[in-house]
Amino acid sequence: MSRFANKTVLVTGGTSGIGLATARAFAAEGAHVIVTARPGRKVEADDGFELVPLDAADVIGARALGAHLAAAGRKLDAVFVNAGIAEFASLTDATEDLWDRTFGTNARGAFFLIQALRPVLAQGASIVLNGSINARIGMPNSAIYAASKAALISLAKTLSAELLPQGARVNVVSPGPVTTPLYGKLGFDADTLKQVATQIQGQIPLGRFGTPEEIASTVLHLSAPESAFIVGTEIIVDGGMSQL
């Protein structure tokens, strides 16, 4: 298929995991892909993406990106707001810094990026936010992270209402456990990480973790004309973990 031929799409956090898989999926269907990444991060040379250094919490940088695209007369047909952080702490151990850092990246960063990109959204553009099933389940130690993702689910509804007059819509894809580098960044040693992964896998009715490519396929569906009647909605992709 070439659903995105001659289209320009933006994927934040597009150098690894779900972001990279989604950027590659867009490119495979003909899109010109712009990916953002923290300064210093790189994408593989053979992917041919346009790389923009941008931290997900950098509102000034987001505005600069929007202004640059506007000055160049470029329009975005799809945006996948994927970049974010996942840090966990118990109610006892959680700090104000963790709260501010998590919401500053996952919620505040996403909101002001969309604000900055609004002038360069093409007619009929699609924005997909990367949520999480943590917003739907009561997992201990995930309160701050889960709340930041719940904020994105709310934003999909309110921002859709604001953007519909210009033909743009916002939806959420909420992954369950996925085999991405994120799990290697949780601060566990190898043995503990294996035990945690086994425990989580046992809670998934399908009996396995999802793949970044499976999440990417849902993002592309929500970004394509075929889903034009889907607005302000969350699609959960978790192997049944939060549903059964």
Image (cartoon, grey):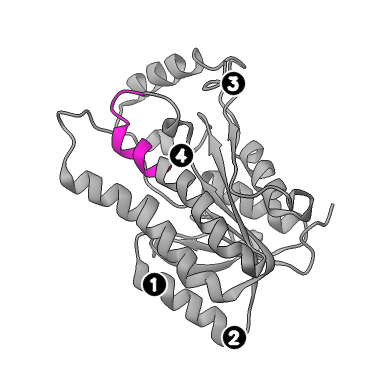
Number of residues whose C-alpha sits closer than 10 Å to that of mark 4, classed few (under 14), some (14–19) or many (20 or more)? few
- Res. 170 in view: yes
Vertical arrangement, residue 3 with respect to residue 173, above or below: below
Rendered location of residue 201, percent (x, y): 50, 17
**Does the magenta-highlighted stretch encompass residue 58?**
no
Mark 3 → mark 2, Cα distance in angstroms: 44 Å
Seen from the viewer's position, the closer of residues 45 and 172 is 172
Of the image marks 1 and 3, the number of the one nearer the N terminus: 1
Seen from the viewer's position, the closer of residues 111 and 30 is 111
Rendered location of residue 198, percent (x, y): 45, 15
What type is the residue that disc 3 sits on?
Gly
Rendered location of residue 233, percent (x, y): 60, 43
Q: Residue at (51%, 46%) from the top-left corner?
A: 130
Q: Residue furthest right?
A: 1
Query: CB under 8 Å between callouts 4 and 1?
Result: no
Disc 1 marks which residue? 61
Query: CB under 8 Å between callouts 1 and 3?
Result: no
Give the structural element (helix, strand or loop) at label 4.
Answer: helix
Query: CB under 8 Å between callouts 1 and 2?
Result: no
Disc 2 marks which residue? 72
Disc 3 marks which residue? 240
Mark 4 → mark 1, Cα distance in angstroms: 25 Å
Of the image marks 2 and 4, the number of the one nearer the N terminus: 2
Q: Which residues are magenta?
A: 139-149
Task: State which quarter of the image contains the C terminus.
Answer: top right
Seen from the viewer's position, the closer of residues 232 and 220 is 232
